[in-house]
């Protein structure tokens, strides 16, 4: 009998939240193209869509913006916990612990509330920024109520108001990271919530799942490639050399997307619009164009397209986000999708309880 592994192809839930279709290159959030949301909408609008099922009107948007802004300030007990955690604990472990600690008696309620999802989303970036600065011996930066979610994240990390183009590129990245179907962390969060556990415990479980290198994805290998290439004039020779030696170009090809990855497409559009002379964006666009031409020459018929990691790397390089914050930032984005799934799970809840096939030894009968 074939080994049962990874639940590949198994439908674990019905959902109204997101569709991933790798053959057609479709990524849809509640009836809207994620690509369109990333290019034309704000973080707050996309989050409203995932949590509430519709894009907000002006009044709803203003109200959500206010609620998110009011939730950015770290409660004293969170600061104390952040200061007490060992400095050697990596950021994903920090997030898992701090999020779990928010499940106080008043908060650990069933069913979970959308207000908890909002507050957690706003808090996560403040937690990341506080911890990151504290590890560098820098004083924390208070949130800036005039800035939106992405711009405020950059501000709380650096203490400087970000270039609006960089904030826009980060917004697009965050929107595209919000949701991706029944991926491992979303599944794990839904399973935890299905026991009528609270939203914070479920997000903490999802963070633990996201932490693994097979899931958390980091565009660092693409960044290493772009840094090694360095300048546009070196790109073609550098990549030909890799391909002639049987190597792979980082940021191209995908196991699921056998056509253009819609997340890469959206980030390319944002990158193209925002280049404004930014050298890292210009280098990335040139490398991509050259790579696609060379892959068609060296690997004809293999259906190799630019994947999300490529343009994520361009965005990360432009905004100068430290490597150790890539997965936590992705986590901060995915929290919106996780919590939307958890709220949906709560509405139709039935505890997850799959079966396993016993393949171990049986006792000896009849002796
Ligand atoms: N550069 C050059 N050739 C490639 C690349 C690439 N990036 N990706 C695949 N190929 C070639 C392979 O060499 C192989 O060629 P062959 O038929 O001559 O042997 C053919 O395309 C098929 O390759 P597979 O490994 O079977 O394709 P698969 O779909 O399993 O791999 C993967 C997907 C692992 C992402 C692959 O494309 C890859 O290694 N890409 C580079 C690393 C990368 O960008 N990773 C980030 C992925 S995005 C994400 O995880 C969110």
Image: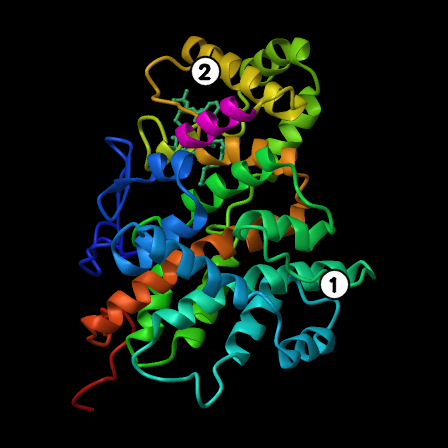
| Magenta residues, start to end | 265-274
Can see residue 329? yes
Single out the residue that lies furthest toward the front: 59
Q: Residue at x 21, y 57 (%)?
A: 15
Residue 239, compared with residue 27, is above or below; it is above
Residue displayed at 65% across by 36% down: 163
Q: Is residue 183 visible?
A: no
Q: Position of residue 54 (x, y in %)?
A: 26, 52
Q: Which is more foreground, mark 1 or mark 2?
A: 1
Image-quadrant location for residue 234: top right
The answer to if 266 sits in the magenta stretch is: yes
Left or right placement of residue 3 versus residue 169 in this view = left
- Mark 2 neighbour class, 10 Å CA radius: few under 14, some 14 to 19, many 20 or more: some
Q: Which residue is mark 2?
A: 292
Q: Report whether the residue tagged 1 is closer than 8 Å to ligand 1.
A: no
Label number found at residue 140: 1
In what element is the residue under mark 2?
helix
């Amino acid at each position: 009998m074939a080994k049962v592994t990874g639940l590949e192809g198994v439908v674990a839930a019905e959902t109204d939240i997101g569709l991933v279709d790798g053959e057609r290159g479709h990524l849809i959030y509640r009836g809207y193209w994620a690509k369109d949301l990333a290019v034309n909408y704000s973080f707050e609008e996309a989050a409203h869509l995932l949590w509430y099922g519709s894009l907000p009107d002006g009044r709803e948007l203003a109200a959500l913006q206010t609620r998110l802004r009011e939730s950015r300030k770290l409660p004293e007990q969170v600061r104390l916990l952040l200061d007490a955690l060992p400095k050697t604990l990596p950021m994903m472990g920090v997030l898992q612990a701090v999020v779990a600690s928010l499940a106080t008696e008043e908060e650990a309620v069933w069913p979970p509330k959308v207000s908890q999802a909002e507050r957690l989303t706003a808090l996560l970036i403040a937690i990341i920024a506080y911890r990151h600065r504290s590890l560098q011996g820098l004083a924390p930066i208070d949130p800036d109520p005039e800035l939106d979610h992405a711009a405020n994240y950059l501000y709380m990390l650096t203490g400087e108001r970000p270039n609006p183009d960089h904030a826009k590129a980060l917004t697009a990245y965050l929107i595209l990271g919000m949701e991706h179907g029944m991926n491992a962390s979303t599944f794990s969060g839904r399973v935890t919530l299905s026991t009528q556990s609270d939203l914070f415990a479920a997000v903490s479980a999802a963070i633990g799942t996201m932490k693994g290198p097979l899931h958390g994805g980091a565009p660092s290998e693409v960044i290493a490639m772009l840094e090694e290439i360095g300048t546009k004039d070196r790109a073609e020779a550098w990549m030909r050399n890799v391909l002639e030696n049987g190597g792979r170009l980082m940021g191209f090809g995908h196991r699921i997307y056998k056509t253009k990855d819609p997340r890469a497409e959206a980030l390319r559009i944002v990158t193209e619009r925002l280049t404004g002379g930014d050298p890292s964006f210009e280098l990335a666009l040139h490398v991509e164009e050259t790579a696609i031409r060379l892959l068609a020459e060296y690997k004809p018929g293999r259906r190799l397209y630019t994947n999300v990691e490529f343009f994520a790397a361009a965005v990360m390089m432009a905004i100068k986000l430290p490597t150790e914050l890539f997965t936590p930032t992705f986590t901060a984005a995915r929290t919106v999708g996780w919590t939307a799934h958890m709220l949906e799970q709560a509405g139709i809840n039935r505890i997850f309880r799959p079966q396993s096939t016993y393949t171990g030894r049986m006792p000896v009968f009849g002796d």
